[in-house]
Amino acid sequence: MNWEQVPNHVDGKDVPAASGEWLDKFRPADASLLTQLARSGPADVDAAVAAAHRAQPGWADRTVVSRGDLCREIALALRSQREELSELVAAETGKSIDAARGETDAAIEMGFFTAGEGRRYYGRTTTASMEHRTVLTMRQPLGVAGLLISFNTPLPNVAWKVFPAILCGNACVLKPSEHTPASAHAFATTCREAGLPDGVLNVVQGLGSEAGAALVEHPDVDLVSFTGSAATGRRINETAGRRLAKVCLELGGKNALVVCDDAALDNAVRWALASAFSNAGQRCAAASRIVVFDPVYDEFRSRFLAEAREYDPGPVISEEALARLVEAGAERIDRPGYWVEPTVLEGIAPDAELSCRELFGPITILYPVGDLDEAVSLVNDSPYGLTAAIHTASIHRAMRFAEQAQAGVVVVNGGTHGSEPHMGFGGVKQSGTGWREAGVEALDVYSDWKYVNLIADPAKA
Ligand code: NAD
Protein backbone atom coordinates (compact mmCIF):
# COMPACT_ATOMS: atom_id res chain seq x y z
CA MET A 1 0.00 0.00 0.00
CA ASN A 2 1.22 3.48 -0.83
CA TRP A 3 0.81 5.58 2.28
CA GLU A 4 1.83 8.80 0.60
CA GLN A 5 -1.75 9.20 -0.54
CA VAL A 6 -4.91 7.57 0.79
CA PRO A 7 -7.51 7.32 -1.99
CA ASN A 8 -11.19 6.44 -1.81
CA HIS A 9 -12.22 2.81 -2.11
CA VAL A 10 -15.24 2.46 -4.39
CA ASP A 11 -16.59 -0.74 -5.93
CA GLY A 12 -13.44 -2.62 -4.98
CA LYS A 13 -11.08 -0.07 -6.53
CA ASP A 14 -8.83 2.63 -5.14
CA VAL A 15 -9.72 5.92 -6.79
CA PRO A 16 -8.78 9.56 -6.22
CA ALA A 17 -11.51 12.09 -5.45
CA ALA A 18 -13.34 13.50 -8.47
CA SER A 19 -11.92 16.92 -7.58
CA GLY A 20 -8.38 15.55 -7.80
CA GLU A 21 -7.67 17.36 -4.53
CA TRP A 22 -5.85 16.00 -1.49
CA LEU A 23 -5.83 17.04 2.18
CA ASP A 24 -2.74 16.87 4.38
CA LYS A 25 -2.69 14.59 7.42
CA PHE A 26 -0.03 15.30 10.07
CA ARG A 27 1.41 12.98 12.74
CA PRO A 28 0.17 14.11 16.18
CA ALA A 29 3.44 13.03 17.82
CA ASP A 30 5.64 15.53 15.91
CA ALA A 31 3.40 17.45 13.48
CA SER A 32 5.26 16.05 10.45
CA LEU A 33 3.32 15.17 7.29
CA LEU A 34 2.15 11.54 7.44
CA THR A 35 0.04 11.27 4.30
CA GLN A 36 -2.59 12.93 2.17
CA LEU A 37 -6.20 11.89 1.84
CA ALA A 38 -8.65 12.25 -1.00
CA ARG A 39 -10.79 15.37 -0.60
CA SER A 40 -14.14 13.93 -1.59
CA GLY A 41 -17.43 15.65 -2.28
CA PRO A 42 -20.93 14.84 -3.54
CA ALA A 43 -19.73 13.23 -6.81
CA ASP A 44 -17.58 10.72 -4.91
CA VAL A 45 -20.39 9.98 -2.48
CA ASP A 46 -22.78 9.44 -5.42
CA ALA A 47 -20.40 6.91 -6.95
CA ALA A 48 -19.92 5.08 -3.66
CA VAL A 49 -23.64 4.95 -2.83
CA ALA A 50 -24.39 3.72 -6.37
CA ALA A 51 -21.80 0.95 -5.99
CA ALA A 52 -23.28 -0.05 -2.63
CA HIS A 53 -26.78 0.00 -4.08
CA ARG A 54 -25.73 -2.34 -6.90
CA ALA A 55 -23.87 -4.74 -4.64
CA GLN A 56 -26.38 -4.98 -1.80
CA PRO A 57 -29.06 -7.33 -3.23
CA GLY A 58 -26.52 -10.02 -4.17
CA TRP A 59 -24.85 -9.73 -0.80
CA ALA A 60 -28.18 -9.98 1.03
CA ASP A 61 -29.05 -13.08 -1.03
CA ARG A 62 -26.26 -15.03 0.64
CA THR A 63 -27.14 -16.83 3.83
CA VAL A 64 -26.34 -15.01 7.02
CA VAL A 65 -24.13 -17.98 7.95
CA SER A 66 -21.98 -17.35 4.88
CA ARG A 67 -21.85 -13.62 5.61
CA GLY A 68 -20.72 -14.52 9.14
CA ASP A 69 -18.08 -16.86 7.72
CA LEU A 70 -16.69 -13.97 5.70
CA CYS A 71 -16.58 -11.80 8.84
CA ARG A 72 -14.40 -14.52 10.35
CA GLU A 73 -12.11 -14.52 7.28
CA ILE A 74 -11.77 -10.75 7.59
CA ALA A 75 -10.98 -11.02 11.31
CA LEU A 76 -8.31 -13.64 10.58
CA ALA A 77 -6.81 -11.44 7.85
CA LEU A 78 -6.75 -8.48 10.23
CA ARG A 79 -5.03 -10.65 12.81
CA SER A 80 -2.33 -11.63 10.32
CA GLN A 81 -1.65 -7.90 9.81
CA ARG A 82 -1.85 -6.94 13.47
CA GLU A 83 1.57 -5.31 13.59
CA GLU A 84 1.28 -3.21 10.40
CA LEU A 85 -2.21 -2.07 11.32
CA SER A 86 -1.14 -1.13 14.84
CA GLU A 87 1.83 0.85 13.52
CA LEU A 88 -0.48 2.72 11.21
CA VAL A 89 -2.87 3.57 14.04
CA ALA A 90 0.02 4.67 16.27
CA ALA A 91 1.30 6.99 13.53
CA GLU A 92 -2.14 8.42 12.73
CA THR A 93 -3.21 9.04 16.31
CA GLY A 94 0.05 9.45 18.24
CA LYS A 95 -0.92 6.78 20.77
CA SER A 96 1.59 4.19 21.95
CA ILE A 97 2.12 1.04 19.92
CA ASP A 98 0.84 -1.01 22.87
CA ALA A 99 -2.39 0.96 22.99
CA ALA A 100 -2.71 0.65 19.22
CA ARG A 101 -2.20 -3.13 19.42
CA GLY A 102 -4.94 -3.36 22.05
CA GLU A 103 -7.29 -1.52 19.72
CA THR A 104 -6.39 -3.71 16.74
CA ASP A 105 -7.17 -6.73 18.91
CA ALA A 106 -10.50 -5.20 19.89
CA ALA A 107 -11.41 -4.68 16.22
CA ILE A 108 -10.46 -8.30 15.45
CA GLU A 109 -12.54 -9.60 18.38
CA MET A 110 -15.53 -7.69 17.04
CA GLY A 111 -15.12 -9.64 13.81
CA PHE A 112 -15.06 -12.99 15.60
CA PHE A 113 -18.04 -12.08 17.76
CA THR A 114 -20.06 -10.95 14.75
CA ALA A 115 -19.09 -14.07 12.79
CA GLY A 116 -20.70 -16.20 15.51
CA GLU A 117 -23.92 -14.20 15.27
CA GLY A 118 -24.30 -15.55 11.72
CA ARG A 119 -25.10 -18.93 13.30
CA ARG A 120 -27.53 -17.47 15.82
CA TYR A 121 -29.44 -14.61 14.23
CA TYR A 122 -32.42 -15.75 16.27
CA GLY A 123 -35.97 -14.65 15.71
CA ARG A 124 -39.10 -15.61 17.67
CA THR A 125 -42.12 -17.75 17.02
CA THR A 126 -45.41 -16.97 18.65
CA THR A 127 -49.07 -17.87 18.54
CA ALA A 128 -51.97 -15.86 17.17
CA SER A 129 -55.61 -15.48 18.09
CA MET A 130 -56.61 -17.03 14.77
CA GLU A 131 -56.46 -20.82 14.61
CA HIS A 132 -53.88 -22.59 12.41
CA ARG A 133 -51.72 -19.52 12.33
CA THR A 134 -48.06 -19.40 13.38
CA VAL A 135 -46.23 -16.13 13.55
CA LEU A 136 -42.47 -15.85 13.29
CA THR A 137 -40.01 -13.00 13.06
CA MET A 138 -37.02 -12.58 10.81
CA ARG A 139 -34.50 -9.83 10.37
CA GLN A 140 -34.17 -8.01 7.07
CA PRO A 141 -31.37 -5.73 5.91
CA LEU A 142 -31.96 -2.03 5.52
CA GLY A 143 -30.08 -1.55 2.24
CA VAL A 144 -27.27 1.01 2.08
CA ALA A 145 -25.73 2.03 5.41
CA GLY A 146 -23.88 5.34 5.68
CA LEU A 147 -21.28 4.99 8.44
CA LEU A 148 -19.57 8.06 9.90
CA ILE A 149 -17.01 7.78 12.68
CA SER A 150 -14.67 9.58 15.02
CA PHE A 151 -10.88 9.38 15.02
CA ASN A 152 -10.33 8.35 18.63
CA THR A 153 -10.07 4.55 18.37
CA PRO A 154 -10.10 4.30 14.59
CA LEU A 155 -10.03 0.55 13.97
CA PRO A 156 -12.61 -0.45 16.61
CA ASN A 157 -14.78 2.43 15.41
CA VAL A 158 -14.72 0.94 11.89
CA ALA A 159 -15.17 -2.63 13.15
CA TRP A 160 -18.10 -1.82 15.44
CA LYS A 161 -20.07 -0.53 12.49
CA VAL A 162 -18.85 -2.48 9.45
CA PHE A 163 -19.04 -6.03 10.88
CA PRO A 164 -22.66 -5.92 12.08
CA ALA A 165 -23.71 -3.87 9.04
CA ILE A 166 -22.42 -6.45 6.57
CA LEU A 167 -23.53 -9.43 8.66
CA CYS A 168 -27.08 -8.10 8.46
CA GLY A 169 -26.85 -7.98 4.65
CA ASN A 170 -26.31 -4.27 4.09
CA ALA A 171 -23.77 -2.61 1.82
CA CYS A 172 -21.86 0.29 3.35
CA VAL A 173 -20.35 3.62 2.57
CA LEU A 174 -17.90 4.53 5.30
CA LYS A 175 -16.73 8.10 5.92
CA PRO A 176 -13.80 7.83 8.34
CA SER A 177 -12.49 10.80 10.27
CA GLU A 178 -10.21 13.05 8.24
CA HIS A 179 -7.69 12.51 11.08
CA THR A 180 -7.51 8.72 10.57
CA PRO A 181 -7.86 7.94 6.88
CA ALA A 182 -5.17 5.28 6.50
CA SER A 183 -6.42 2.70 9.01
CA ALA A 184 -9.91 2.81 7.44
CA HIS A 185 -8.40 2.31 4.01
CA ALA A 186 -6.32 -0.60 5.28
CA PHE A 187 -9.43 -2.17 6.81
CA ALA A 188 -11.31 -1.96 3.50
CA THR A 189 -8.34 -3.38 1.59
CA THR A 190 -8.18 -6.29 4.01
CA CYS A 191 -11.91 -6.92 3.54
CA ARG A 192 -11.50 -7.02 -0.24
CA GLU A 193 -8.52 -9.36 -0.01
CA ALA A 194 -10.46 -11.63 2.34
CA GLY A 195 -13.20 -11.99 -0.28
CA LEU A 196 -15.79 -9.30 0.47
CA PRO A 197 -17.51 -8.62 -2.86
CA ASP A 198 -16.82 -5.32 -4.59
CA GLY A 199 -19.21 -2.55 -3.56
CA VAL A 200 -20.23 -4.07 -0.21
CA LEU A 201 -17.80 -1.79 1.64
CA ASN A 202 -16.90 1.55 0.08
CA VAL A 203 -14.80 4.21 1.78
CA VAL A 204 -15.08 7.89 0.97
CA GLN A 205 -12.37 10.04 2.54
CA GLY A 206 -12.53 13.73 3.28
CA LEU A 207 -13.98 16.42 5.49
CA GLY A 208 -17.18 16.08 7.48
CA SER A 209 -18.66 19.24 6.02
CA GLU A 210 -18.05 17.98 2.48
CA ALA A 211 -17.95 14.17 2.13
CA GLY A 212 -19.80 13.55 5.43
CA ALA A 213 -22.60 15.99 4.76
CA ALA A 214 -23.10 14.63 1.22
CA LEU A 215 -23.42 11.09 2.58
CA VAL A 216 -25.98 12.09 5.21
CA GLU A 217 -28.01 14.00 2.62
CA HIS A 218 -27.97 11.22 0.02
CA PRO A 219 -31.52 9.96 -0.68
CA ASP A 220 -30.36 6.36 -1.29
CA VAL A 221 -28.73 5.98 2.14
CA ASP A 222 -31.24 3.99 4.20
CA LEU A 223 -29.42 4.14 7.54
CA VAL A 224 -27.08 6.76 8.95
CA SER A 225 -24.98 5.34 11.76
CA PHE A 226 -22.80 8.00 13.35
CA THR A 227 -20.22 8.10 16.14
CA GLY A 228 -18.97 11.55 17.01
CA SER A 229 -19.81 14.76 18.83
CA ALA A 230 -23.28 15.85 19.92
CA ALA A 231 -22.99 19.01 17.81
CA THR A 232 -22.41 17.03 14.61
CA GLY A 233 -24.97 14.41 15.64
CA ARG A 234 -27.64 17.06 16.07
CA ARG A 235 -26.98 18.39 12.57
CA ILE A 236 -27.03 14.87 11.10
CA ASN A 237 -30.29 14.02 12.84
CA GLU A 238 -31.92 17.14 11.43
CA THR A 239 -30.74 16.42 7.88
CA ALA A 240 -31.46 12.68 7.81
CA GLY A 241 -34.66 13.17 9.82
CA ARG A 242 -36.08 15.34 7.06
CA ARG A 243 -36.23 12.32 4.76
CA LEU A 244 -37.11 9.99 7.66
CA ALA A 245 -33.99 7.85 7.29
CA LYS A 246 -33.14 5.57 10.19
CA VAL A 247 -30.50 7.34 12.29
CA CYS A 248 -28.33 5.85 15.02
CA LEU A 249 -26.21 8.36 16.95
CA GLU A 250 -23.47 7.48 19.44
CA LEU A 251 -22.29 10.77 20.91
CA GLY A 252 -20.22 12.34 23.63
CA GLY A 253 -20.00 12.12 27.39
CA LYS A 254 -19.13 14.08 30.49
CA ASN A 255 -18.58 10.97 32.52
CA ALA A 256 -18.29 11.04 36.29
CA LEU A 257 -16.27 8.81 38.58
CA VAL A 258 -17.36 8.94 42.23
CA VAL A 259 -14.97 8.22 45.10
CA CYS A 260 -16.81 7.46 48.35
CA ASP A 261 -15.26 7.73 51.82
CA ASP A 262 -15.10 3.91 52.06
CA ALA A 263 -13.30 3.46 48.73
CA ALA A 264 -9.97 1.64 48.37
CA LEU A 265 -8.06 4.81 47.54
CA ASP A 266 -5.15 3.18 45.67
CA ASN A 267 -7.58 1.52 43.33
CA ALA A 268 -9.66 4.68 42.98
CA VAL A 269 -6.60 6.81 42.13
CA ARG A 270 -5.38 4.25 39.59
CA TRP A 271 -8.72 4.08 37.80
CA ALA A 272 -9.34 7.80 37.98
CA LEU A 273 -5.99 8.45 36.27
CA ALA A 274 -6.58 5.95 33.49
CA SER A 275 -10.19 7.09 33.05
CA ALA A 276 -9.28 10.77 32.82
CA PHE A 277 -6.06 10.68 30.85
CA SER A 278 -5.63 7.50 28.79
CA ASN A 279 -5.81 8.07 25.04
CA ALA A 280 -5.13 11.74 25.92
CA GLY A 281 -8.67 11.95 27.32
CA GLN A 282 -10.01 11.50 23.79
CA ARG A 283 -12.52 8.86 24.81
CA CYS A 284 -16.28 9.23 24.79
CA ALA A 285 -16.13 7.41 28.14
CA ALA A 286 -13.36 9.58 29.67
CA ALA A 287 -13.83 10.54 33.32
CA SER A 288 -13.92 14.30 32.92
CA ARG A 289 -15.62 14.77 36.31
CA ILE A 290 -14.28 13.22 39.50
CA VAL A 291 -16.62 13.48 42.45
CA VAL A 292 -15.03 12.89 45.85
CA PHE A 293 -16.60 12.57 49.32
CA ASP A 294 -15.44 15.32 51.71
CA PRO A 295 -13.65 13.09 54.29
CA VAL A 296 -11.25 11.66 51.65
CA TYR A 297 -11.08 14.68 49.34
CA ASP A 298 -7.69 16.02 50.47
CA GLU A 299 -5.99 12.66 50.51
CA PHE A 300 -7.41 11.61 47.13
CA ARG A 301 -6.56 15.02 45.66
CA SER A 302 -2.91 14.97 46.74
CA ARG A 303 -2.33 11.41 45.51
CA PHE A 304 -4.18 12.05 42.25
CA LEU A 305 -2.29 15.28 41.51
CA ALA A 306 1.07 13.67 42.28
CA GLU A 307 0.40 10.81 39.87
CA ALA A 308 -1.18 13.07 37.23
CA ARG A 309 2.08 15.04 37.06
CA GLU A 310 3.89 11.82 36.08
CA TYR A 311 1.24 10.61 33.63
CA ASP A 312 2.02 10.63 29.90
CA PRO A 313 -1.32 10.85 28.11
CA GLY A 314 0.22 11.10 24.62
CA PRO A 315 -0.57 13.84 22.11
CA VAL A 316 -4.03 14.98 21.04
CA ILE A 317 -5.13 14.56 17.47
CA SER A 318 -4.59 17.99 15.90
CA GLU A 319 -3.49 21.58 16.32
CA GLU A 320 -7.19 22.65 16.44
CA ALA A 321 -7.95 20.15 19.22
CA LEU A 322 -4.94 21.41 21.14
CA ALA A 323 -6.02 25.05 20.76
CA ARG A 324 -9.48 24.22 22.15
CA LEU A 325 -7.92 22.52 25.18
CA VAL A 326 -5.56 25.41 25.89
CA GLU A 327 -8.58 27.71 25.84
CA ALA A 328 -10.22 25.47 28.46
CA GLY A 329 -7.18 25.70 30.78
CA ALA A 330 -4.67 23.07 29.64
CA GLU A 331 -1.01 23.91 29.14
CA ARG A 332 0.79 23.16 25.89
CA ILE A 333 3.99 21.14 26.23
CA ASP A 334 6.89 22.79 24.44
CA ARG A 335 7.82 20.13 21.89
CA PRO A 336 6.86 19.41 18.27
CA GLY A 337 3.42 17.83 17.88
CA TYR A 338 0.15 18.32 19.75
CA TRP A 339 1.00 17.73 23.38
CA VAL A 340 -0.72 19.15 26.48
CA GLU A 341 -0.08 18.52 30.17
CA PRO A 342 -2.64 16.37 31.99
CA THR A 343 -4.80 19.01 33.66
CA VAL A 344 -6.83 18.88 36.88
CA LEU A 345 -9.24 21.75 37.58
CA GLU A 346 -10.95 22.57 40.90
CA GLY A 347 -13.44 25.10 42.13
CA ILE A 348 -15.61 24.90 39.03
CA ALA A 349 -19.36 25.04 39.74
CA PRO A 350 -21.18 21.86 38.69
CA ASP A 351 -23.44 23.89 36.42
CA ALA A 352 -20.64 26.03 34.91
CA GLU A 353 -20.05 25.77 31.19
CA LEU A 354 -16.77 23.84 31.70
CA SER A 355 -18.60 21.29 33.83
CA CYS A 356 -21.19 20.67 31.13
CA ARG A 357 -19.20 20.81 27.87
CA GLU A 358 -17.27 17.77 26.66
CA LEU A 359 -13.62 18.82 26.28
CA PHE A 360 -12.28 15.58 24.74
CA GLY A 361 -8.75 15.95 26.07
CA PRO A 362 -6.67 15.19 29.17
CA ILE A 363 -8.60 17.59 31.42
CA THR A 364 -10.66 16.58 34.41
CA ILE A 365 -12.45 18.48 37.15
CA LEU A 366 -12.59 17.58 40.86
CA TYR A 367 -15.78 18.20 42.88
CA PRO A 368 -16.21 17.66 46.66
CA VAL A 369 -19.56 16.25 47.86
CA GLY A 370 -21.09 15.49 51.26
CA ASP A 371 -22.86 12.20 50.60
CA LEU A 372 -24.20 9.76 48.03
CA ASP A 373 -27.37 11.75 47.31
CA GLU A 374 -25.32 14.81 46.51
CA ALA A 375 -22.96 12.72 44.37
CA VAL A 376 -25.81 11.18 42.39
CA SER A 377 -27.46 14.51 41.73
CA LEU A 378 -24.13 15.98 40.60
CA VAL A 379 -23.50 13.00 38.32
CA ASN A 380 -26.96 13.34 36.78
CA ASP A 381 -26.81 17.12 36.48
CA SER A 382 -25.30 16.86 32.99
CA PRO A 383 -26.57 17.02 29.43
CA TYR A 384 -24.81 13.69 28.82
CA GLY A 385 -25.29 10.18 30.20
CA LEU A 386 -22.82 7.72 28.70
CA THR A 387 -20.87 6.02 31.51
CA ALA A 388 -20.42 6.47 35.26
CA ALA A 389 -18.31 4.79 37.92
CA ILE A 390 -18.37 4.56 41.71
CA HIS A 391 -15.68 3.45 44.15
CA THR A 392 -17.08 2.07 47.38
CA ALA A 393 -16.93 -0.97 49.64
CA SER A 394 -20.68 -0.82 50.21
CA ILE A 395 -22.95 -3.02 48.13
CA HIS A 396 -25.83 -0.81 49.12
CA ARG A 397 -24.14 2.33 47.78
CA ALA A 398 -23.02 0.50 44.65
CA MET A 399 -26.52 -0.76 43.88
CA ARG A 400 -28.17 2.58 44.58
CA PHE A 401 -25.69 4.27 42.30
CA ALA A 402 -26.19 1.63 39.59
CA GLU A 403 -29.94 2.20 39.76
CA GLN A 404 -29.88 5.98 39.94
CA ALA A 405 -26.99 7.09 37.72
CA GLN A 406 -28.33 8.25 34.35
CA ALA A 407 -25.94 6.36 32.09
CA GLY A 408 -25.75 3.52 29.59
CA VAL A 409 -22.86 1.83 31.45
CA VAL A 410 -22.12 1.83 35.20
CA VAL A 411 -18.90 0.45 36.68
CA VAL A 412 -18.33 -0.35 40.35
CA ASN A 413 -14.73 -0.07 41.60
CA GLY A 414 -13.24 0.41 38.13
CA GLY A 415 -12.91 3.03 35.42
CA THR A 416 -15.37 4.75 33.14
CA HIS A 417 -14.94 2.64 30.06
CA GLY A 418 -16.49 1.30 26.92
CA SER A 419 -17.48 -2.27 26.39
CA GLU A 420 -16.46 -5.58 24.93
CA PRO A 421 -17.80 -6.93 21.64
CA HIS A 422 -20.62 -8.87 23.31
CA MET A 423 -21.83 -5.94 25.44
CA GLY A 424 -24.17 -3.30 24.10
CA PHE A 425 -22.71 0.20 24.42
CA GLY A 426 -24.43 3.56 24.27
CA GLY A 427 -25.84 6.27 26.47
CA VAL A 428 -28.86 8.29 27.49
CA LYS A 429 -29.73 11.97 27.13
CA GLN A 430 -27.39 13.76 24.68
CA SER A 431 -24.97 10.80 24.57
CA GLY A 432 -27.04 9.16 21.87
CA THR A 433 -30.44 8.40 20.47
CA GLY A 434 -31.10 5.24 22.43
CA TRP A 435 -29.41 2.64 20.23
CA ARG A 436 -26.70 0.31 21.48
CA GLU A 437 -23.67 -0.63 19.42
CA ALA A 438 -21.76 -3.90 19.76
CA GLY A 439 -23.42 -6.90 21.38
CA VAL A 440 -26.48 -8.49 19.82
CA GLU A 441 -28.05 -5.06 20.27
CA ALA A 442 -26.04 -3.87 17.24
CA LEU A 443 -28.12 -6.18 15.05
CA ASP A 444 -31.13 -4.00 15.84
CA VAL A 445 -29.31 -1.00 14.38
CA TYR A 446 -28.48 -2.73 11.11
CA SER A 447 -31.65 -4.72 10.48
CA ASP A 448 -35.42 -4.36 10.67
CA TRP A 449 -37.77 -6.94 12.09
CA LYS A 450 -40.34 -8.55 9.84
CA TYR A 451 -43.34 -10.48 11.22
CA VAL A 452 -44.33 -13.43 9.06
CA ASN A 453 -47.78 -14.99 9.45
CA LEU A 454 -48.07 -18.64 8.33
CA ILE A 455 -51.57 -19.99 7.96
CA ALA A 456 -51.07 -23.72 7.81
CA ASP A 457 -54.60 -24.75 6.90
CA PRO A 458 -56.30 -21.99 4.89
CA ALA A 459 -59.55 -23.93 4.60
CA LYS A 460 -60.05 -23.84 8.35
CA ALA A 461 -58.64 -20.37 8.99
P1 NAD B 1 -16.93 14.99 15.10
O1 NAD B 1 -18.39 15.09 15.38
O2 NAD B 1 -16.19 16.24 14.84
O3 NAD B 1 -16.67 14.08 13.80
C1 NAD B 1 -17.11 12.75 13.70
C2 NAD B 1 -17.25 12.38 12.23
O4 NAD B 1 -18.27 13.17 11.63
C3 NAD B 1 -15.98 12.64 11.42
O5 NAD B 1 -15.85 11.62 10.45
C4 NAD B 1 -16.28 13.96 10.75
O6 NAD B 1 -15.57 14.15 9.54
C5 NAD B 1 -17.77 13.83 10.48
N1 NAD B 1 -18.49 15.11 10.35
C6 NAD B 1 -18.18 16.32 10.87
N2 NAD B 1 -19.09 17.25 10.50
C7 NAD B 1 -20.00 16.60 9.73
C8 NAD B 1 -21.19 17.00 9.05
N3 NAD B 1 -21.61 18.27 9.07
N4 NAD B 1 -21.89 16.08 8.39
C9 NAD B 1 -21.49 14.79 8.36
N5 NAD B 1 -20.36 14.36 8.97
C10 NAD B 1 -19.64 15.25 9.64
O7 NAD B 1 -16.30 14.18 16.28
P2 NAD B 1 -14.76 13.77 16.52
O8 NAD B 1 -14.01 14.96 16.97
O9 NAD B 1 -14.25 12.99 15.37
O10 NAD B 1 -14.94 12.74 17.71
C11 NAD B 1 -15.10 13.11 19.02
C12 NAD B 1 -16.52 12.89 19.49
O11 NAD B 1 -16.93 11.56 19.24
C13 NAD B 1 -16.65 13.10 20.99
O12 NAD B 1 -17.83 13.82 21.23
C14 NAD B 1 -16.77 11.68 21.51
O13 NAD B 1 -17.38 11.58 22.76
C15 NAD B 1 -17.55 11.02 20.42
N6 NAD B 1 -17.43 9.56 20.46
C16 NAD B 1 -18.50 8.83 20.87
C17 NAD B 1 -18.43 7.44 20.97
C18 NAD B 1 -19.62 6.61 21.40
O14 NAD B 1 -19.60 5.41 21.20
N7 NAD B 1 -20.63 7.19 22.01
C19 NAD B 1 -17.24 6.80 20.62
C20 NAD B 1 -16.16 7.57 20.20
C21 NAD B 1 -16.26 8.95 20.13
Image (spheres, rainbow, N blue to C red):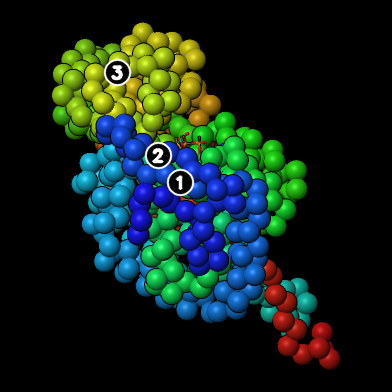
Confirm or deny contact between disc 2 and disc 1 (CB under 8 A). yes
Nearer the observer: mark 2 or 3; the answer is 2
Residue 247 in picture, x, y percent from top left: 63, 48
Front one among 339 and 107: 339
In the image, taking residue 61 as reference, residue 109 lies left or right, namely left
Nearer the observer: mark 3 or 1; the answer is 1
Which residue was labeled with disc 2? 25
Numbered mark located on residue 332 in the image: 3
Residue 305 in picture, x, y percent from top left: 20, 18
Say if 230 sits above or below 141 in the image: above
- Of pointers 2 and 3, the one earlier in the residue sequence: 2
Numbered mark located on residue 194 in the image: none
Which residue was labeled with disc 1? 37
Label 2, label 3: how far apart the Cα atoms are = 21 Å
Q: Residue at x 84, y 91 (%)?
A: 459
Q: Amino acid at mark 1?
A: Leu
Can you say which quadrant of the picture contains the C terminus? bottom right
SS type, badge 3:
loop
SS type, badge 2:
strand
- Quarter of the figure with residue 172: bottom right
Say if 71 sits above or below 317 in the image: below
Q: Residue at x 81, y 88 (%)?
A: 458
Front one among 252 and 130: 252
In the image, taking residue 115 as reference, residue 333 lies left or right, namely left
Q: Is residue 118 visible?
A: no
In the image, taking residue 270 as reference, residue 185 lies left or right, namely right
Q: Residue at x 70, y 57 (%)?
A: 220
Front one among 192 and 107: 192
SS type, badge 1:
strand
- Quarter of the figure with residue 455: bottom right
